[in-house]
Image (cartoon, grey):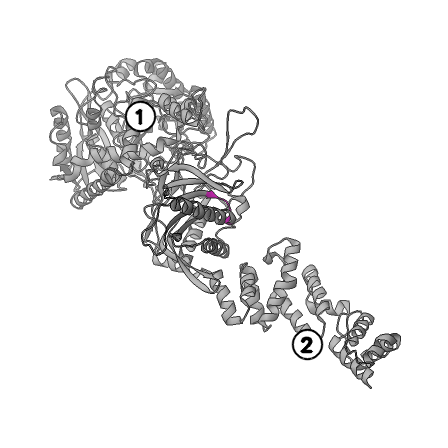
Amino acid sequence: MGSELSYLKLSALEIRELIVSGRVSAVDVVRGLLDWVEKGDREVCCFVTVDAEGAMAHAEAIDRKVSAGERMGLLAGIPVAVKDNICTESLLTSCSSHILEGFEPPYDAHVVTRLQDEDAVVVGKTNMDEFAMGSSTENSGLFPTGNPWDTGRVPGGSSGGSAAAVAAEMAYLALGSDTGGSIRQPAALCGVVGFKPTYGRVSRYGLIAFASSLDQIGPIGRTVSDVALMTRVISGHDPRDSTCVDRAVPDYPALVDAGVEGRTFGMPVECFGEGLEPETEEAVRAAVGKLKGLGGNVVEISLPHTEYAVAAYYLIATAEASSNLARYDGVHYGYRPEKAEDIIELFSRAREEGFGSEVKRRVMLGTYALSAGYYDAYYLKASKVRSLIKSDFDKAFGEVDFIVCPTSPSPAFKLGEKVDDPLKLYLCDIYTIPANLAGLPGISIPCGLSTEGLPIGVQLMGRPFDEEGVLQAARAVEGALDFEPRRPPLARRRTGS
Amino acid sequence: MAKYEAVIGIEVHAELWTKSKLFCGCNAEFGASPNTHTCPVCLGMPGVLPVMNREAFEHALRAALAFNCRIPRITRCDRKNYYYPDLPKNYQISQLYANLGTDGYVDLFLDGSEKRVGILNVHIEEDAGKLLHPETPGADFSLVDLNRAGVPLLEIVSAPDMRSVEEADAFMRTARDMLLYLEASDCKMEEGSLRFEASVSLRPEGAEKLGTRVEIKNLNSMKAVNRVVGYEIDRQEKRLEMGEGVLQETRLWDEESGATSAMRSKEEASDYRYFPEPDLVPIELDEGWIESARESLPELPHYRRRRFVTEHGLPEYDASVLTQERAAADFFEEAVSKGAAAKSVSNWLMGDVLRLVNEKKIAFSELGLSADNLVEVIKLVDSGEINRSAAKDVLEEVIDSGKSPGEVVRDRGLAQISGEEELEAVARKVIEGNPKPVEDFRKGKKGAVGFLVGQVMKETRGRANPKVVSEILTRLLSS
């Protein structure tokens, strides 16, 4: 029992090596993990669905493949968690919303197919802000999730369940989705690595849309190398998503240790001003200092339109969401109110009773932004701001290879602390939103702990499709940082270390 | 009494002729049992994405070019948002901000005059499904059939340039014939492949300013459009005469009563909240693509009709019948190019050939007649080898058996007897056997020779050359 539980703190690459070499069985790994989920998740509440039966059956199949000496996939036997807005065939997929109650998709998302092709074991679906709208997972229509570092605090969001699961060692890797920071911000708050690849790098087929032009699936893991591994698996062309580009996928995990010597990092002055907590700033600046020590150059840059990013984002994202979420009307699938008198009542009550308040707020905002007479002033203007933000980045990347800044203005806040102030909550994403508006790759890695013992994240952004460079830079910082502890108290208690 | 001028605009909605739907691989064919031609994409399930059907897009591009539209460098789809249970996503992928074609025109050739009608835009969109309301008494539900959801539609929006029912009718016919020629749509109105919307307003004759417009949607035939436009002109004229004015509204046409009724007014009009479809990438149309599409356009039917009159000297009527179906017009030109006289070819096509097509209830191209064979039949008649009535039989057998006309004539011994000696012998026999007509002829009733010619034809089982027979008989009787 003890040895099974100690496997859980290993990295994905390490556990894969043990499984494919036959030293550990996938069944033991998955069983150990499921036992821990059953116990530990009562406290964290990161899973909305656990597929114990499916995971065990899959683990047995992996072990048979190992015994038969077959070629093993890149993720062989690795238990992974999937955010609940990513479709899994015949496995409940709810977006943590009542309106998708009982919905079992008849298809897998492209990324899920890729995971399975590489022999990963999907153990369950993780909690999230309803339809990915939020930064704390408190907007889940089901229940809130606790931060493994302090379960009285939020794990961030919207991929809070995935980040918490990885931090709590209830999954080696997890898939999240990032529309305005929903992978990077919870990764920062949970002390793990979260990566949003370039828009178009990973197929969105099967990702339940929030804002189509901003949504991107990405991995969450405990090390940069693990994240590089999962990025390699999920990236690449898919003819079912026309926004997904046909470009060769480098072997990221093999390239990740190249270092940063001679590379230039830009620190945007706009990201180190008002609203940034001093402890966070200190930790991020310390990480930047490490880059210099590794042979990197650091310069100050300006991204002058950053101050309009949050405003533009909340117009574009809500406008797209108002249309994307129109299909949830009680007619075809999901929640259907009983005894509706006519079609209008059916539509209205399905949405009134099925959606939570944040979703309704954003659908209304978006509907307004697209309405006749307001389209030019809101949606169109926001699109123009988006172009300006993009050109800020284009200009910056003429001078620097990477941009480095905080992921979140502060570490994890207390559950309930910001629920009554949506605007304050929206500002949690101030440093992550620009990468979505510009479609850039962005990663968050842990760079220290606050005096309260809460993780702080540093963010690195790169040129479009330079996932390779971003992962290399992240790996370099990761290797240079030497704070302790890296594991949350919850996981340390389990293993007694 | 004030005189009013009608101002009419028409939208043509044609289902594009493709194997699969606009954004998924589902079969786009009409008539399958409900909801069998569906998949997660056209059912609008969560997380799925549309992918543009290249065949549909190319059809639409060719149509836009045929309607003389300007083609932008970049065209894009937009979402049209509205709630309806036959629309699974509750938005329709259409175009508004960057239509595939804009500012085009089409020339109508009316009786003795020409008229140019502007085309505001040509764009592509997906069709919706269909609601079925059970007729069972007390049924408190409706059913949805989504087979048609996602079938590609082409929308051609005319400028309000038509002034009469006749012009509206000519516009619809021209548009339909063009789409058939382009093989962009099968235009089967009974299957809903071709639908229309009309807008009608009146203004005092000579006025510049447009009157208040009424729109009528969901018209399933050209006949319905003609009736609705006629009805609206009358209705609006009466209202204007009585000083009541016309309300800007959308009206519903009732086929049975032959009248329109108010559906929704301008104030109730939907706000579709169009915005660019983020799930589809903009389509860049480079010059090469546009040019190769333009080069692939066939000569359009209305221009071809005019050319058949001027170039081949056909009567207007022949030209319009022959150009209705592209295969027939191609056949005509091929036969003429192989040396047959235009009018002979036209006569054969409009007579026996189209009769056979109609009898067999098939398309012209399915008849299996080659231009070479018809030219050969015509030559056999012209050279006197067979007569006209035998030629009809030959043609039918050529079609049924696939033999060449020469083979049929030889196998069936249909070659015309033109030999003087052989025919003279028969003629003498006929004269002997028919004293009464012979006497009539000799008394001056020259017409009696016709009966005798008929008798010779009968004796030779139709193989005699009637012209030669007539000459021989006249000579024998006059001597």
**Marking on residue B9:** none
Relative height, residue A53 to residue B170 (above, below): above
- The residue pinned by badge 2 equals B383
**Residue span colored magenta:** B218-222
Q: Is residue A34 magenta?
A: no
Residue A51 as seen in the image, left or right of residue A426: right
| Number of residues whose C-alpha sits closer than 10 Å to that of mark 2, classed few (under 14), some (14–19) or many (20 or more) | few
The picture places residue B186, in percent across and down from the top left corner, at: 52, 50
| Number of residues whose C-alpha sits closer than 10 Å to that of mark 1, classed few (under 14), some (14–19) or many (20 or more) | some
The picture places residue A29, in percent across and down from the top left corner, at: 38, 21
Q: Nearer the viewer, residue A207 or A321?
A: A321
- The residue pinned by badge 1 equals A360
* Residue at the farthest front position: B1
Relative height, residue B314 to residue A453 (above, below): below
Q: Is residue B220 magenta?
A: yes
Q: Which quadrant of the figure has residue A238?
A: top left
Q: Which quadrant of the figure has residue A11?
A: top left
